[in-house]
Image (spheres, rainbow, N blue to C red):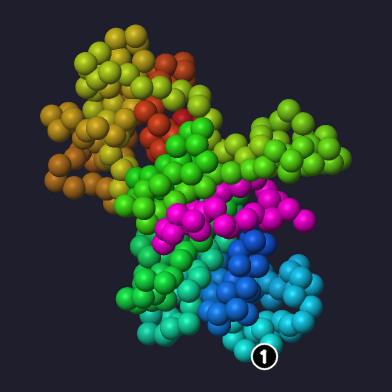
Amino acid sequence: MAWYNYDKINSYNAMLNIIMTNRGFGKSYGSKKMAIKNFIKKGEQFVYVRRYKTEITKQFKQFFDDIKTEFPEHSFKINGNKAYIDDKICGYALPLSTSANDKSTPFPLVTTIIFDEFIIDTSTGIKHYIGNEVELFLDLIETVARKRDNVKVYMLANFISEVNPYFIYFNVFPKKGERFTLARNGEMVIDVTTNDDFIEEKKKTRFGKLIANTKYSDYSIDNQALRDSDTFINRYPLKQCNPVCVLKYGDSKIMVHFHKSGVMYFHKKVDLTAHTFSLDIDSHDATSLLNTSVLNYPIFKNIIKCFQLGLVAFHNQEVKSICYDIFRRLGVK
C-alpha cells in the first residue's frame, strides 16, 4: 500500500505541517502509523481532530482498522473518544466544533495533533467551515500544547482549493511549482505533493481510465486544485488603472479598478480615497455606504456587465473566490 512518508516534512521541524496530496495517497494512513510508533516507542499520545462530532462518531471507531495488521504483537481498541494500544490510552478524538469545552482538560502526554480533511468543498453547499474556525483551532492547539514546545500539528487534506480560511488567515499560499512552502519563521510548512508511480498506478485502474482527461482526474490523480482555475487570474500595474470603488463584504475589502484595456481589475490594495460600498449589513460601518439595492447604481451595473462579458481580472485565487461570492450576492448567475 502506498502511504505518505512523513520523514521529509518532519525534517523541517515546523510546528504546523500542512499536507495536501491527491486522493488515496495515504497521508491519513501515514499519520496513524507515525502516531502509533510514537506511542509504542516513547509513550507519546495523539489527538485526532475532525470538524464536527458526527464525523468523529463515524470515523474514529474505525481508526485502527486499516493499520493494526502492521502491528500484530499489539492490541488496538477504540472506546468512545479514546484510543487504546495494549489497554493503555494512546490518543483522543476531539470535534473542533465543541473543542472549547475541553479548554480545562490537560493533555500532558500528547505530542501529535492530526486534523484530517481540514479543507472542505464548499461548492456543494452541504458542508461549511465553522465561524471563526481558524482561531478555534488555534485555541485547541494551545489547550493541548500549553507552554510545551514538543507538540507538532499535522493538517491533512485533498487539494480541493488553496482558497480556504487557514491560508487566508495566515496570508500564506503554496508556491506554484514547488513542493514545500515555508512560512511563519519556519514554524509552518506546506507540502503539495504526489508521486509519479502512484499517478501511473491510478491511471491504469478502471476508474482512472473512466475519468481520464477530466478535471476530476486532474484533482484525484494529478493533485491539481479541484475548485481553482486560472481563468481571469491576471495582474495589472495600478498606474494603468483608474479607481472605481471598494466593495466591502463580510471581513473582506475588494478594490475595483478600471484598466485602460477595458477590464475591471479586482485586488486587495485598497485606495482610501475611493467610495466604499457595504454589500451586507454585518460589514457596514461609518466608513461605508450600505446598499440594499445596489443594482440601481451605474457603478454596479458596469461591474456586472464586465463580468458577464468576461472583461474582468482578479489579482489571485483568494480575490477571485471572494468576488464570485459578491457576484452571487448581486444576483449574478
Q: Which residue position holds label 1? A: 87
Residue that extends furthest to the bottom in the rendered view of this protein: 87
Image quarter (top left, top right, bottom left or bottom right) of the N terminus = bottom right
Q: Secondary structure at mark 1?
A: loop
Label 1 CA crowd tier, 10 Å (few <14, some 14–19, many 20+): few
Q: Is residue 281 in view from this perspective?
A: no
Between residue 250 and residue 163, name the one nearer to us.
Answer: 163
Please check the rendered image and state whether residue 164 is part of the magenta-colored stretch, yes or no: no
Q: Position of residue 299 (x, y in %)?
A: 28, 23
Asked if the stretch drawn in magenta spans residue 2, the answer is yes
Of residues 155 and 102, the one nearer the viewer is: 155
Residue at (23% x, 28% y) in the render:
245
22 over 76 or under it: above or below: above
Determine whether, in the image, residue 227 is placed left or right of residue 324: right
Left or right: 251, with 122 as reference point: left
Q: Using the image, determine if residue 28 lies above or below residue 301.
A: below
**Point 36% across, 22% down: residue:** 235
**Image quadrant where residue 48 sits:** bottom right
> Where does the magenta region start and end?
1-26
Exactly how many numbered labels are in the figure?
1
Point out the residue furthest to the top here: 261
Q: Amino acid at mark 1?
A: Asp
**At x 58% / y 74%, what residue is drawn?**
38
Q: Name the spot of residue 28 as percent of width and height, x first.
A: 64, 60
Q: Residue 170, percent across and down?
A: 35, 50
Which one is nearer the viewer's eye here, 198 or 158? 198
Quick check: can you spot residue 252? yes
Prevailing secondary structure of the magenta residues: loop
**Residue at the location (37% across, 48% down)?**
183
Toward the viewer: 280 or 271?
271
Where is residue 154 drawn, in percent x and y?
51, 61
